[in-house]
Amino acid sequence: MAGFEGSKFNRRGVIVALLASAALAGCGGSGGASKGEAGASVAPAANGAIEKPVLKLGFIKLTDMAPLAIAKEKGFFAEEGLNVTLEPQANWKVLLDGVIGGQLDAAHMLAGQPLAATIGYGTKADLIAPLSMDLNGNAITLSNKVWNQIKPALPKGADGKVKHPISAAALKPVVEGLKRQGKPFTMGMVFPVSTHNYELRYWLAAGGLNPGFYTPGDVSGTVGADVKLSVTPPPQMPATLEAGTIDGYCVGEPWNQAAVQKKIGVPVITDDQIWHDNPEKVLGLRRDFAEKYPATTAALLRAIIKAQQWLDANGGANRAEAVKVLAQSNYVGADEKVIAASMTGQFTFEPGDTHPAPGFNIFFDKFAGYPFYSDAIWYLTQMRRWGQIDQDRPDQWYFDAAKAVYRPDLYLAAANSLVETGAIPATSIPKTDGFREPQGGFIDGITYDGRAPNAYLAKFSIGLKQGQKVTPGGVR
């Protein structure tokens, strides 16, 4: 698919016509509304002059912040009449507080953050996610010590190399050995409501290891845990692993490949192997910002969508240039070779064992930018599964919570205006009622249907069931 070239069109200050088409089907009843046409939406009042042209956006130093960096460096923000400053944040908590407090207008955000804030877990704020930043992009890395303990027993291919994906069941002897010594097996993740936390927990549970449950007011989530999980900011993961504080971690790139380069750890599985084409980060902002500045919000979304398309254009032909941008100290600030190891269609598990990974980072293809309600509901099911949502909720609650945060109406207003001007193809907008069809591709073989969240939760052997609650003494 040809990428959009900013020089071909000059749309600074373009007034986008209101899209007076049929309303996007909501999440009523069972969530199974009939599918509408691509882009069917009542557009918000996003036409007219930019109300707030000077913006500050936050990000964490990860390669999946690329749409923001590219929108800045390739002139997509400026093309939309926006003067944007991109500001790295120390950690996800600081970033979240910056958006809630108004110091940041929007941010590259963990998908679970606007959902958790809106339902009142950890903090309370009305945040929205009108755009998904990407699919995939994370991996799980183990220390050399742990890897050397499990490697001899792992299945090998004809070439003598370890077969992937690797089940967490391989860790059981190591975990049990430490337990007999009275020591915990500890892994790092980036935030309690991060994709990384839920992916790591999903992988461990699929391998028969309990990652622990949360109780009200408890952010450690260690009740009944076989494996202890702790929070570490992404750029600090390799150093924390090298210091021996943690035995492994789940993080986004380039911090898994950094462990390979430093020869301190070995990635064992990518998140795409845990859940094929899983949703990752979102653009998060306050609901009242979008209401107060509708034209600014639409312009912001248009610029990022164009950057997403640029990143995936022509089979990733622009990725080498993107790597150079991301390597700059004001963005990710890692070595180009480390960033390129995953951003350019390959992934190294250990020296000499590099695999093709053309879909490791997807920014535009496969409708990566569309904020599906079912993606939001998956995160909410995992919050319930591990006790962050401390009591049962009916299916309708999940639908309503997802619809309050994920805003395909805003996405469609921006995307359809780009279709009208020829910037993106109409085929890049899904024909959907906001739900994906039931999804497979999970490491445990379980199928996920966002229209039936409670039925989905009932399928897991490890995780809260209907009627169960977590107490400090265990699940009851």
Image (cartoon, helix red, strand yellow):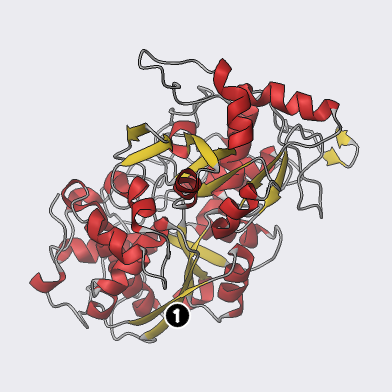
Instruction: Give the residue displayed 58% in from the left and 36% down from the top.
Output: 144
Where residue 99 appears, as percent x and y from the top left, is: 56, 73
Total numbered badges shown on the rendered structure: 1
Where residue 417 appears, as percent x and y from the top left, is: 22, 66
Q: How crowded is the residue under tag 1: few (<14 C-alpha within 10 Å), some, or many (20+)?
A: some
Where residue 247 appears, as percent x and y from the top left, is: 66, 40
Quadrant placement of the C terminus: top right
Return the residue found at the far front: 263
Amino acid tagged 1: Lys
Return the residue found at the far left: 8
Return the residue found at the far right: 473
* Residue 299 or residue 49, whichever sits in front: 299
Reply above or below: 165 against 383. Answer: above
Residue 224: image quadrant is top right
Identify the element where label 1 is drawn. strand
Task: Give the left or right position of residue 207, taking residue 256 as reference.
Answer: right
Instruction: Give the residue displayed 36% in from the left and 42% down from the top.
Output: 360
Instruction: Give the residue displayed 40% in from the left and 47% down from the top.
Output: 434
Where residue 266 appears, as percent x and y from the top left, is: 51, 37
Q: In the rendered image, which residue does mark 1 sit on? A: 56
> Is residue 470 shown to the viewer in this render?
yes
* Residue 238 or residue 193, whichever sits in front: 238
